[in-house]
Amino acid sequence: MKVDSATAAAEEVRVESAALVQQSSLLARIAATVAELRKSERAVAELVLARPSEVLHLSIAELAQRVGVSQPTVARFAAALGFSGYKEFKLRLAQSLASGVPFVHQDVGPDDALELVAPKVFDRTIGALINVRNHLDPAQLSRAVKILAKARRIECYGVGNSGIVALDAQHKLFRFGVPAVSYTDTHTMAMAATVLKRGDAVVAISASGRTTDMLGSVEIALESGAEVIAITAGGSPLAKLASVPLYADVPEDPEIYAPMISRLAHLAIIDVLCVGVALTMGPALVKRLERAKQTLRDKRIHQLES
């Protein structure tokens, strides 16, 4: 009977943790990085995922004692997620729990009827986009927009599925009158990064933020003097390298399905940046965009009046 009670309690914790992970992009980030943490840091992560509300009321010493690790281990756990310290981590955790979106959807399963697939996919996507929106840092967005608005040249990097987003970014940015290109081939990307200069900007897109070729190209771009805006997972190596990281933490398993939700989140962030750049450039840009629109109109078949 005791075993059954313990099993039931463990299952309750697991279900509660899963629900909370869906509600918070920060908890989703922690869940996504658990396997890559050191064993002692992993123990801290598991307690945070299981009891996030309790952690809010624990000091670093109390959390360390509860887990059975040292205080520096807790500090390293916070640093691994991209925070300056435990204090900043707790603040972000509080914000995440306060603004968490109550998900009501479930993942698509192999036995689901087709009529259930569309609602599940849409619900999951909508919820993920709201979470990304709620956790975008306005200060970082402002920095990114300023960099792009004054850039001499903009290069967009993306590998695999992220390459599609890089192409979309280039398609939008070149209309602003700034030389903009996209690279999806890793060799070309690295070579292009070597000839960048101060005043140039790179938009690096990666769902995982752990692609070695992408990281290498970003390092070269930074050494060349360019500023790098990264749209990626928080706490990832790419986020830590970037001049301005913009987090898109999406609960998605790329090993099961090709990344879809993360790609939509990345596209939405690109749209936000482009609207911000357009507003920053002001009236002069409006005339340029109007000329571009007229060019498109001239290529369309006009509807005949009846």
Image (tube, grey):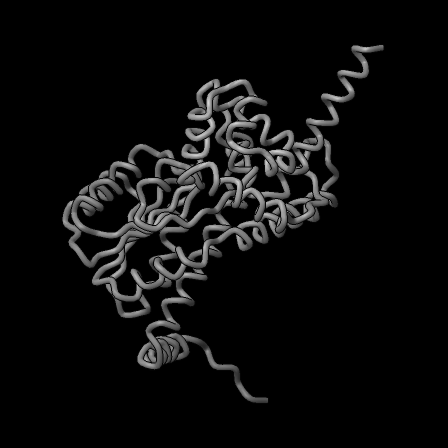
Q: Residue furthest bottom?
A: 306
The vertical placement of 16 against 146, above or below, is above
* Residue 75 spot, x, y in % from top left: 43, 30
The quadrant the N terminus occupies is top right
Q: Residue at x 31, y 69 (%)?
A: 176
Name the residue: 27% across, 39% down: 186
Q: Quadrant of the C terminus?
A: bottom right
Q: Position of residue 209 (x, y in %)?
A: 39, 38
Q: Residue farthest to the right?
A: 1
* Residue beneath the point at 55% across and 22% down: 65
Evaluate whether residue 121 shows in this view: yes
Residue 36 visible in this rendered orientation of the protein: no
On screen, residue 210 versus residue 26, left or right, reads: left
Identify the image quadrant of residue 4.
top right
> What percent of the width, then of the height, locates residue 128?
58, 48
- Reply above or below: 21 against 284: above
Residue 144 vs residue 44, the one in the foreground: 44
Location of residue 117 in the rendering, given as x and y in whole percent from the top left corner: 69, 43
Number of labelled discs? 0
Q: Which residue occupies the foreground of this view, 110 or 259?
A: 259
Quadrant of res 134: bottom right
Q: Is residue 120 left or right of residue 91?
A: right
**Image position of 156 with respect to 237: above or below:** below
Closest to the observer: 22 or 73? 73
